[in-house]
Image (tube, rainbow, N blue to C red):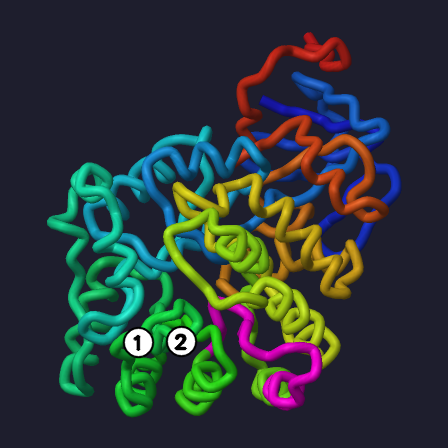
Amino acid sequence: MRTVIRDVRVFDGQRTVERADVFIDGDRIVEPDGRPADVQVDGAGRTLLPGLIDAHTHTFDGSLAQALAAGVTTELDMFCLPDNLARQRRLAAERDDVADLRSSGLLATAPGGHPSQLMTGLDPQALAALGDAAGAFPAVAEVADVAPFVAARVADGADYIKIVIDDGVMHGADLPVLTPEVVSALVEAAHAAGLKAIAHAITTREVTIALDAGVDGLAHVYADAGSDDPAGRRLAQRIAAEGVFVVTTLAYFEAISQGAALDHVVAGSAANAVHAAGVLHRAGVTLLAGTDATPFAPQHGTAMHRELALLVKAGLTRTEALAAATSVPARHFGLTDRGRVAPDLRADLLLVEGDPTADITATRAVVDVWRRGVRQTRQPAAADAPRN
């Protein structure tokens, strides 16, 4: 099946072309070669983008379908129990009506550490649906536990290692937390296995521990530094100097500040998070758009559109925000076959009404989504012309 999207504005992951024809052949974007297309899609007044990549999610049954419907063609899961992960991986591999998936699998946390308190708050039926006994997962108590933990994640096929550094202060709790020595050992073991180390750290103190250990990326912005706090600015400069990327998750902080999730975070964290994103951006830190989507809040797929709006509020240009949800996460997570609209890459694409480079909310007006070149089922449009 060959498809051409005619006369469409293209944001290719880095820059915008005001008018172009984009060809899809099988699962790839291709150069025009004079051969006829089987289907023509009218792109006039619309914008074609790479499929969005959500750089921080938690995937459950139904999540990947929900994400794809909103234009998120790849999710980077940051914690998934084994039975559930096997099921989601199989779904993503076998079907094109769901988003693709990468995952850390189980995360590294202290015994009783975050997110153990959230797992115990889940309904028993929800845990049973995951297929994992009581939501239990192995903890990392000391340096001696690190090598077997990382080896088990490698055996599970983890795409990166997730490390939790969270003492609970931002949750209004007092939680056990990994020691700096254990964090450093986890980063070293991850790197020895050829995997990136991503840290969950949401205060400036926790981020400092992560940086001292040599992490590659942070799974959240820090949310304890207000607009008049110089510590946040100094930390942003260090993050930039060390080349560490940050997944923003502004939609997450907004959702929990509104009491819409199972977590609790101290007052002001949502505003602090947006402020921190702006400080990080101005310091030259690479930002990746991620939502921390769950089955509760924020929601898979739709939360990414809110994340983009919050990134613009934080001071990114609309083009920078779109890149943070497409080419930038693709580059930092080694997804070399997607994240841009270019020949020979996967046809993971999003077509929207209007121009999100002028109005970021236009990403919400989804017209079509392609995953691996497969156009998602919808009512036929009069502008689509089958070709004989």
Residue 232 magenta-highlighted? yes
The answer to which of 219 and 29 lies nearer the viewer is: 219
Q: Residues within 10 Å of mark 2 (few under 14, many from 20)?
A: some
Q: Which numbered marker is on residue 169?
A: 2
Q: Helix or strand or loop: what does disc 2 sit on?
A: helix
Say if 374 sits above or below 286 in the image: above
**Pointers 1 and 2 in contact (CB under 8 A)?**
yes
Taking the image as shown, residue 159 lies to the left or right of residue 274, namely left
Q: Position of residue 322 (x, y in %)?
A: 70, 53
Q: Residue at x 24, y 65 (%)?
A: 153
Image quarter in which the N terminus is found: top right
**Residue that numbered label 1 is attached to:** 174
Give the CA separation, mark 1 to mark 2.
Answer: 6 Å
Q: Nearer the viewer, residue 120 or 306?
A: 120
What residue range appears in magenta? 216-235
Q: What is the x, y in percent for residue 156?
A: 22, 58
Q: In the displayed image of the protein, which residue is found farthest to the left?
A: 133
Image disc number at residue 72: none
Mark 1 residue element: loop
Q: Position of residue 286 (x, y in %)?
A: 63, 72
* Labels 1 and 2: the sequence-earlier one: 2
Q: How many marks?
A: 2
Query: Mark 2: which amino acid?
Result: Val
- Prevailing SS of the magenta stretch: loop
Task: From the top left corner, tell me how far across and down residue 317 is, in percent.
Answer: 79, 60
Q: Residue at x 72, y 24 (%)?
A: 35
Nearer the observer, 24 or 280: 280
Q: Quadrant of the C terminus?
A: top right
Looking at the image, residue 146 sits to the left or right of residue 252; the answer is left
Which residue: 20% across, 44% down? Answer: 127
